[in-house]
Amino acid sequence: MNETDISKIDQDVIDNFEYFQNVRRHIHAHPEVGPEQPDTVDFIKEQFKGMVDIVILEAQAKAGVVIDIICKGDGPIIGFRADMDALDIMESSCDTHFPHLNNFCSKFENKMHACGHDMHTATLIGFGKIMYEHRKNLKGKIRLLFQPGEEGHGGAAHMIGAGFLEGVQNVFALHNWPNMQLGQIGLKKGPFFASIDHFKVKINGIGGHGAAPEKASDQILAMSRIINDLQAVISRRISGLEQAVLSVCYANAGSPSALNVLPQSATFGGSIRTFNASTQDKIEEEFKRVCQNSALSIHPSCRVEIEYTREYPQTVNDESLCCEVEKVFSQFIKKENLFSNYTPTLGAEDFSFMLEKTPGVIFLVGGTAPEKLNQDTVFLHNPSFDVDEKAMLFGVQAFKSLAFNFLS
Ligand SMILES: [Zn+2]
Ligand SMILES: [Zn+2]
């Protein structure tokens, strides 16, 4: 077990910890779900109110808010992004849950910052406040991108649509990581988060009496055949060297109050994740082929409607920038706590859209105190999820070191 080492964190970062904490706790207690986070945006603007050398950019609510810190001379624009949205989850009221113990649990039923975006937002605000004091020693612009709707709403794409990435040289983001110790940072060159595709499938055909299956086309049997056969897409049609996951996450047909009726239709849906765009294409093609053929193998009247959507692409870190980021981070993190080839995650991130447009890097910040990290550590999207607030020291320091590196 490593002790968390904060000896190389800058004094101004440490001195502002209480502010980071207060900001984080306010946001945690007031979570907003969905494609827009208007109250969080107001709260952010409030933090920068009345300051000179600050420009606030806004478009439609789905594009969030941008705060530019204007430094002294000409130089590049460097972007730093935080996602602001919460999830439809009822927060734990268990006595061991830190936000509950400290009286800053979500004030709203079924809404919770269970992915740590409260910490990301507070980190970016805290970083902005600190960099504001350093602006006269730097050139160019620091662009703080406060992004709404990361959890399935593609807020990053709306920010790009609003033109907020025009002229930005590089863009950086972080995600807290419960499976990593506080004080550690994980980086990865190339694909780091998977793509995500969603599918919804409806099988239509002839309904009928449970006593006379020969007069119906049995959509439930067709659905179960398709779901079974889909498991061969990844295992039999994709190289064992590729990583991909296909999960059917819901299935609906018939009614428990009609146990003698073969229903006319059946539906199911789920998601597909992979790290490689050509594998993604191949899976989509195979997916559609299996759905059609397996349905027909049950009955010629089984017709399949497929709704297949590409949600987020792979999140691909720029390789040479990643090397530079590693060097910058090694100034405040010891080698054994800085992972340059961290395990990629099959989770998806819409920061991917920003990285398609602008070279940049997303990195993971350890969020669990060493003594609390074990196989039962609660992961993201759980009602009992919490991030150790000291992770903000490392997040702010990481952004600050990058700002100095690119804008000095
Ligand atoms: Zn999440
Ligand atoms: Zn997240």
Image: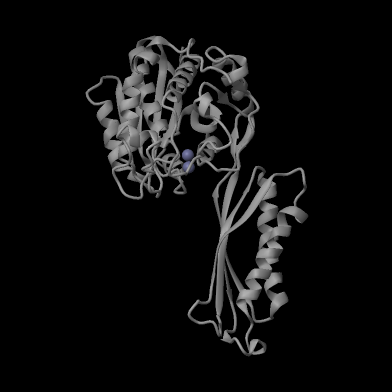
Residue extending farthest front: 95
Residue 326 spot, x, y in % from top left? 59, 19
**Looking at the image, is 198 positioned above or below residue 342?**
below
Residue beneath the point at 68% across and 69% down:
225
- Residue in the foreground of this view, choosing between 374 and 201: 374
Image label count: 0
Q: Is residue 308 visible?
A: no
Q: Can residue 45 be spotted in the picture?
A: yes
Query: Where residue 244 appears, x then y in whole percent?
Result: 67, 48
Q: Quadrant of residue 124?
A: top left
Coloration mode: one colour
State which quadrant residue 46 falls in. top left
Q: Give the image location of residue 150, x and y in percent.
A: 45, 43
The quadrant of the rendering that contains the N terminus is: top right
Classify 384 as above or below 220.
Answer: above
What is the quadrant of residue 289 in the picture?
bottom right
Q: Is residue 144 toward the left or the right of residue 187 in the image?
A: left
Left or right, residue 129 beside residue 171 = left
